[in-house]
Image: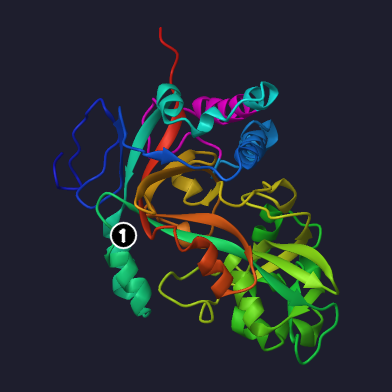
Amino acid sequence: MLKQSVLMLAIASISFLGWANGPRFELENNPDIGQMTLQKVSDLCFVADNTNAYLQNPELASRDKQSVHQGHVFDQGVTLARVQRTLQFICDTYRFDVRNNQPSRLHDVNFIKQHFDFYRWYPDKTTASHIASKSLNDAKQRMLNDIPSDQLFITKYYTKRLTASEQKSKQYPQALYALPFDEQGLSKQQALAQSNSLTRFKYTRQQIIDGALLANKLAQPLVWLSEEALHDVLLQGTGVLDVNGRTRYFNVHRNNGIEYDYALGKREQQRYWYFAEVPGIMGYGDRLEDKIEVRPHVTFAGNVTQLGLGKLIMINYQANGRSTSQMAVLADTGGAFDNNLFQLDLLVDSYAGWSDYHEANKHLPDYAKAWVMLIKQPEK
């Protein structure tokens, strides 16, 4: 493979061709994936089913060109229909094993290798290094610069268990706001056409924290929480909130149009999200009502714009001295993944704080080998 980014060499075994330190995807016939681990195969099927329903919905497919496609980084061997068959196969296998009261074959390495093709994902170190050079956070800069040439940066995201109140107080001075009153009933497209005049696009996160919406009664407060909790929920995208002893879920709805700045910390971000109450933890969706309900440990957030929604992805890492692999579905995204092909974010459950999060996930790596998995083509 030539090292100049302007030159590419066609090789049959490579689905997407990159350049030195750029992203690429290579078909591996016999990957070393070690021992398979899945916390709940039923959860993997749940997310696969929900994501497949999104991909197969004709209305969503015609409207959401950003995510419903085979992936812009693959060749013709990767099709949307094949992605859908892959997700269907996961659930068909799970249900067959349950009906026959047998161990899940999705834990069987030989079964996995028999039925799937593996496209090894090499990270875009060029972009990661460029972002690191602009970051003011020493730890983030180091983590990005240390990405190995053959592994992805694996971060973890979680829904934070927080307390909140239906009333504003000294303890709970900040609100999660619903979509502003002047945008209620407008589609995303209609709102974008009026962006110069709508409340949503007028204020930064800092201005809203200082009271811009409340002072002018521009949006409905959904629930009240501390400022630190607000930053956490804005970062994670979902709040799992204990409100007067009842667990309620809140999910991002639409933002103020300011891009996420990877170089900044959470408090310095100017992007602000408006929220809506939802029945559970929600992943990707073109509209709030279309969002995919997801589950921990079987959901990745990543660059759906370039990869396409619904890719089944396996990561491999060392855990307790053993080569360990796990699968999850690309069913979520976020502003941090714009032009980002060096990172995946694994959903890892709900936690009250850093200590219990760390204790539950300290075995998970910062970097891991990764493959996009597709059901094998039938032999002709």
Q: Residue drawn at (82%, 81%), measured in percent from left and top?
A: 217
Residue that carries the numbered disc 1 in the rendered image? 127
Q: Secondary structure at mark 1?
A: helix
Residues shaded magenta: 68-94
Residue at 50 percent of width and 34 percent of height: 107
* Residue 248 appears in the rendering: yes
For the C terminus, the quadrant is top left
Tell whether position 71 is magenta: yes
Q: Quadrant of residue 364?
A: bottom left
Across and down, in percent, residue 12 comes to: 25, 25
Q: Quadrant of the N terminus?
A: top left
Q: Identify the residue at horizontal 61%, vertical 50% (top origin).
A: 284
Judge from the rendering whether residue 59 lies leftward or rightward of residue 147; answer left or right: right
> Dot 1, crowdedness within 10 Å: few (<14), some or many (≥20)?
some
Q: Is residue 149 left or right of residue 4?
A: right
Query: Is residue 339 positioned above or below 24 on the image?
Result: below
Q: Nearer the viewer, residue 319 or 189?
A: 319
User: Farthest residue toward the bottom?
Assistant: 170
Q: Within the magenta stretch, is there residue 339?
A: no
Label count reads: 1
Which residue type does callout 1 highlight? Thr
Whether residue 203 is visible: no
Q: Is residue 205 left or right of residue 178?
A: left
Q: Where residue 8 appears, x then y in whole percent?
A: 20, 38
- Name above or below for residue 132 compared with residue 328: below
Q: In this rendered view, identify the residue nearer to me: 99 or 184.
A: 99
